[in-house]
Image (cartoon, rainbow, N blue to C red):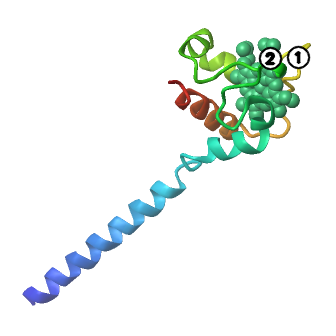
Amino acid sequence: MRFQATTFFKVLGVGTFLLIFTLALQAGPAPDAGGDLFKQKCAMCHGADGKGYAALKTPDFTDPKVQASLTDEEITKTIKNGKAGTAMRPFKDSLSDDQVKSLVTYLRSLKK
Ligand code: HEC
């Protein structure tokens, strides 16, 4: 009887752990989703390292001054709507809100 009870709780414990683990994995885009998206959609103009290209006038996202000059809202808006009169085009039709959010998180992580 005693043995069975212990086994029962062990199985329950492992089951709970697996459930939480699975839910955690499904909770949102993988932490690196922003990095992958950046490489696919942004790196050609902003550089694989996000440092930008002088010739294209793209900002250096690793520069704390550039980071400080932009709010999360501004970055989100720029990605969605682009910047009129520049090569920065709108991405609202090709990226979901979650994808834009993960890009903002990724850009923030580039700060030196
Ligand atoms: C075709 C080239 C090109 C692509 C692709 C591109 N950008 Fe840009 N981006 C630019 C240029 C040029 C600027 C600078 C605009 C300016 O003069 O202020 C810019 C500026 C920005 C800024 C700063 C805006 C500001 O207000 O200073 C952010 C943030 C940004 N891009 C994010 C992204 C993200 C994220 C992607 C990928 C989804 C992306 N860009 C793709 C060309 C591009």
On residue 54, the disc is none
On residue 57, the disc is 2
Tags 1 and 2 touching, CB below 8 Å: yes
Residue 106 location (% of width, % of height): 59, 34
Q: Secondary structure at mark 2?
A: loop
Residue 90 location (% of width, % of height): 85, 27
Query: Ligand 1 is in which quadrant of the figure?
Result: top right
Q: State yes or no: Cβ of the residue under disc 1 lies below 8 Å from any atom of ligand 1.
A: yes
On residue 86, the disc is 1
Amino acid residing under circle 2: Lys
Q: Secondary structure at mark 1?
A: loop
- Characterize the local packing of mark 2: few (<14), some (14-19) or many (20 or more) Cα atoms within 10 angstroms: few
Name the residue rendered at 56%, 48% in the picture. Answer: 28
Is there any visible trace of residue 43 in the rendered image?
yes
Seen from the viewer's position, the closer of residues 62 and 13 is 62
Q: Which mark is first along the chain, 2 or 1?
A: 2
Is there any visible trace of residue 80 in the rendered image?
no
Name the residue rendered at 88%, 22% in the picture. Answer: 87
Report the label total.
2
Q: CA distance from mark 1 to mark 2?
A: 9 Å
Seen from the viewer's position, the closer of residues 106 and 11 is 106
Name the residue rendered at 63%, 23% in the picture. Answer: 61
48 w.r.t. 8: above or below: above
Q: State yes or no: Cβ of the residue under disc 2 lies below 8 Å from any atom of ligand 1.
A: yes
85 w.r.t. 45: above or below: above
